[in-house]
Amino acid sequence: MSQLAWALDWAARGFSVFPLKKGTKTPLHQGWVASATADQNAVRRMWTDPVTGVERAYNIGVLTNDLVVLDVDVKNGKNGLVEYQNLGGHFDTLTVATPSGGYHAYFAGPDSANVSLSDAVDVRSHNGYVVGPGSVLDDIPGTHGAGVYSLVRDVLLQWVPPLIQPKLVGTHERRSAAPALDLDRPEAVAAATNYLSSERPAIEGQGGDNHTFTVAARLVREYALSPDMAVWLLWEHWNPRCSPPWNPDELRAKVENAQLYGHADAAKLDPNVAYAAVGEIAPPPSVFVQIAAGFGNAHAPDTITKRPWMLDRVLMARETTLLLAAGSAGKSSVSLAIVAHMAVGRSFGKYTARVACKSIVYNGEDDVVEQSRRLIAVCAAYGLDYDEVRQNVMLLSADDFDLRIVNSEGRTPIENTAVVNQWIDLASRQDIGLIVYDPMVDVHNVDEGDNPAMNFVMRTLHKIGKAANVASLVLHHTTKAGNTRNEERVGNMDIARGASAIVYKSRIAFTLINASLTDCETYGLQESERNTWVRMDDAKMNLTLADTDPVWFRKQGHKLQTGDVVGVLHLTDLTKDTTPLRVRIANVLMDTMTTNGQASMPVGQCVAVLKVEEPLLANKTDIDIRKRVEGLFATPIEIRGRTLHAKRDGEGPNSKLIVVMT
């Protein structure tokens, strides 16, 4: 089996894997903790060249979070098998043999610190990793040869041996006079690993002792790592290059001294605290805690609370709403209208406001000045007090900062954790209830057509909304219409541009589309004014029943004090009414009959006339026009002192439809 096949097999078993550099135990990318995944498609992408499609011979790293892997070492004369047996260990569990003759024994167990149980037996658990089966080392320490990690016992994971469990150490947290910092964050571990892989080794006689102290101090101080994690990372990624290498006890003594006497800034290099505003984020609970609910855990009826609607059918706390529209369709105007109404707690048309709240609007295309122009115009169009509204709105743009909540390494999406945490901290402030992302494409840099990547983006948006307890309104572009008619696009969530995960991961979605020719007929609009009318339709409603009636907006221009004219979509009542079309067609037919001296007109002649004279019918089929004439004038219409009526010129199958003027 190839390395990719082994990676897929290990991922199928539920292990999170990531690529290691070919022939080594070193992670390929810095963000290996965050990128580790059990998703089959993501694994294939990690092990495949994105340009050529050629499979890469990367070794397999296995993230050991929520596992206890006991690393039994026998190289360099170590007696790991005897020490492991004396500790109470066994191999009656999933076991992988290492090229040097040792073993990785996989157990289920509590998330633990990476520590040494003896000189030759180490624990790999929280934010640690082991090399997976199928991996090949180019150079095995002590043998100067190549070797393969092989699966030697393929059985279900057993719980960690009872004599070893008491020796496990819980994950640590440092406390001091300064605010508490979580140790061993995934991003900090990844960054420290990358640092150690390129840091020069300690050489005896060349200041090696002081250099080791400095390196250790950076880990425990600047990267905010626990001593156990620091020792393990040094042992795995730095110590083998030192001359001579430190033994475990010497290395631990260096780390403990560095923790006590080092003067580097705490957490200076931890990506999670790159921004002073970021608060402490608790680590996620163990998967065993998350699934421990059991049967009968459904809530009793009298304990169920109401859904937290903020704007009925549009915005819900901790949920994501999509507004799908083509470029320049007016989605920014509609979103600002919603923001303005939420600022003062006013209902938006048929959508009832349940709260008044502050909003953050991030616009990746317009600066704050242009957004302000639009907000002024919106408030004027809807009769809202601009000064009151703007006190409850924070406008941000890409000129202020680049809000990329998800980046990518190759084709692998990576959460920009520092920015996400800062964003959550900002949105968690009192009275903030809504974040607008305008448009979504400006808050990530992954492939918009990649379903796993966009699924990751949508989950990150949901994570932010849930953590900050806010609603998220995400503006997203639609595909180009091409040959499709507007009638086929209204309320159709599949017109969203990019991956289907964008819509499927949202709970509420709307389309914003210009009026169609059919709308002009149905609502009595002139074809010439069609593009001044815009309809908003339900496209997805997981949390309530869908409404078949659209909400209508009319484009208006509002003149600012500067003389600039800003377009606004103004909410407008529009009811179905075929009377205008009926009157226009009646006038055309009566004028034609009067000119020709006719008292009646065969329907075929009516069709020919209307295809020329009535723009709304110009592109209709003859059959469609015949049906409209028959339907519109089945009941006589009186106009200009005369009556127009569609009827049959006789009885039986040979009768013909004519329009009679009396």
Image: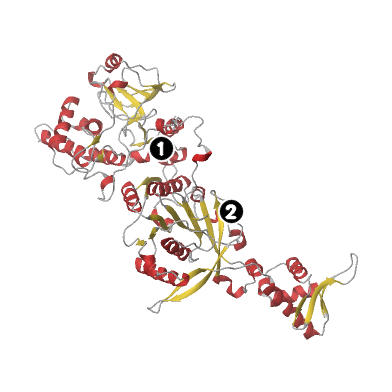
Q: How is the image coloured?
A: secondary structure
Which image quadrant for residue 661? bottom right
Which image quadrant for residue 33? top left
Kindly identify which numbered label has been placed on residue 37: 1
Query: Between disc 1 and disc 2, whose residue precedes?
Result: 1
Kindly identify which numbered label has been placed on residue 424: none
The answer to whether residue 539 of the structure is visible from this angle is yes
Vertical comparison of 255 with 71: above or below: below
Q: Residues within 10 Å of mark 1 (few under 14, many from 20)?
A: many
Vertical comparison of 467 with 162: above or below: below
Instruction: Find residue 552 and report its horizontal and vertical position in percent.
Output: 56, 66
**Type of the residue with mark 2:** Ala
Instruction: Find residue 611 and report its horizontal and vertical position in percent.
Output: 71, 74
Element class at badge 1: loop
Instruction: Find residue 254 and report its horizontal and vertical position in percent.
Output: 15, 31
Q: Which quadrant is the N terminus positioned in?
A: top left
Quick check: 561 left or right of 629? Answer: left
Marks 1 and 2, how far apart in space?
A: 36 Å
Pointer 2 residue: 546
Q: Nearer the viewer, residue 565 or 444?
A: 565
**Residue lying at the far front of the rendered structure:** 302
Q: Residues within 10 Å of mark 2 (few under 14, many from 20)?
A: some
Quick check: 639 left or right of 179? Answer: right
The answer to whether residue 99 of the structure is visible from this angle is no
Q: Nearer the viewer, residue 376 or 355?
A: 355
**Type of the residue with mark 1:** Thr
The nearer-to-camera label among 1 and 2 is: 2
